[in-house]
Amino acid sequence: MTSQAAPQLPLALVGIDPGSEQLYRLVLRYPGSSMESLSDRLGRSMDNLQRDLASLIDRRLVSVIGQQVTPEPPEFALGRLLNQETQRLAEAERALSVAQSEIRTYVGEYLRGQQRSDWRPIPIDVIPDGELLDVMLTLVSNTEGELLFLRPDQWFLPTGQRMDVAVTEAISNGRGSRAIYPEAIIETHPESVQARARAGERIRVLPTVPTRLAVFGAEAVIIPEAWGSTVGARLLVRQPAIVAACIALFDQLWSHALTVPGFDDATASGSARRQLLELLARGAKDEQIARSLGVSLRTVRRWIASMMAELGVDSRFQAGVEAVRHGWL
């Protein structure tokens, strides 16, 4: 049986330990008390009392004149300490924001370091279960290309909801995303799929989904340490051939999966796709295309991302070339 940590007292935030806080509350109730009186009331030795008192004096919460201990007005004394802590936290938040914005820079330096002739990269990292969500959120924010998910059971997990928010935001910014679920979800938990479907994620179902899997463009894949496992550590793999193999596996499963009405409307119909390609070929902007086709700007961007993923290209120019080769234009 695991023991629970004791609740933190309010003044711990500003560096006041429990013994000092207990003493401070007593001084507030009995201002002007002598050291001996406080020692008796608390049942502590004078040495212990003086140590706790020193912490309060250092923070200018109390003052000692002769043998009398007097509190400073708490609205000013504590207000000053809390304002200082608020400033410290604001500075820490700004520093974290800067560090977050620099993640891509650090990733680039890491990849350059891996290319050194005297360095042999280790392309597989073991991610403990407790760190998985943070790693996945970072990958969604700092990779490019289509997102692919095998999701056999994530709607049962609290972490799944935070991933839904991150993926929905990525889709709204024009990123493609596809997910495969077991068909039971349509009957039992359709609401867990609908938010991402409304955002533009393409969704299909299979009778069963063999394992959890998340692919982040061509850059990384996360799979269970034990294939099909729903607990324990995960493997973060950046090795290109393994990532490509996982994409091929997903596409194979996707080709056998079924669409569900209302859950996969991201692909334009044949006539709409031709109109889309013709407008792109004429250099029309996304906003113009949306007005011409009578759809939302987000839908246009989803269609373009889906079409580029289907053609296996990285640019709209390449999409035009491949569309001609496929006979779409």
Image (cartoon, rainbow, N blue to C red):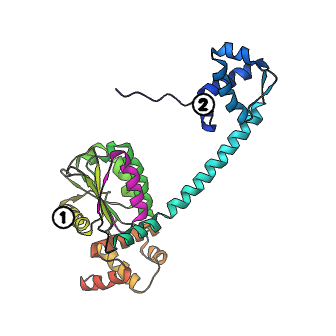
**Is residue 101 found left or right of 88 in the rendered image?**
left
Query: Seen in the image, is 260 located left or right of residue 289?
Result: left
The amino acid pointed to by label 1 is Gln
Look at the image and say whether residue 127 sits in the magenta stretch: yes
Disc 2 crowd rating (10 Å Cα; few below 14, some 14-19, many 20+) is some
Is residue 172 positioned above or below 2 on the image?
A: below
Residue bearing mark 1: 252
For label 1, count other residues whose C-alpha is less than 10 Å away and answer few (under 14), some (14-19) or many (20+): few
Sequence-wise first label, 1 or 2: 2
Mark 2: secondary structure: loop
Q: Which residues are magenta?
A: 121-147
Residue 5 position within the rendered picture, expressed as x and y whole percent measured from the top left: 46, 30
Q: Position of residue 122 (x, y in %)?
A: 29, 62
- Label 1's element? helix
In the depicted structure, whether residue 21 falls above or below residue 262: above
Residue 129 appears in view? yes
Q: Residue at x 36, y 71 (%)?
A: 305
Give the labeled residue for mark 2: 17
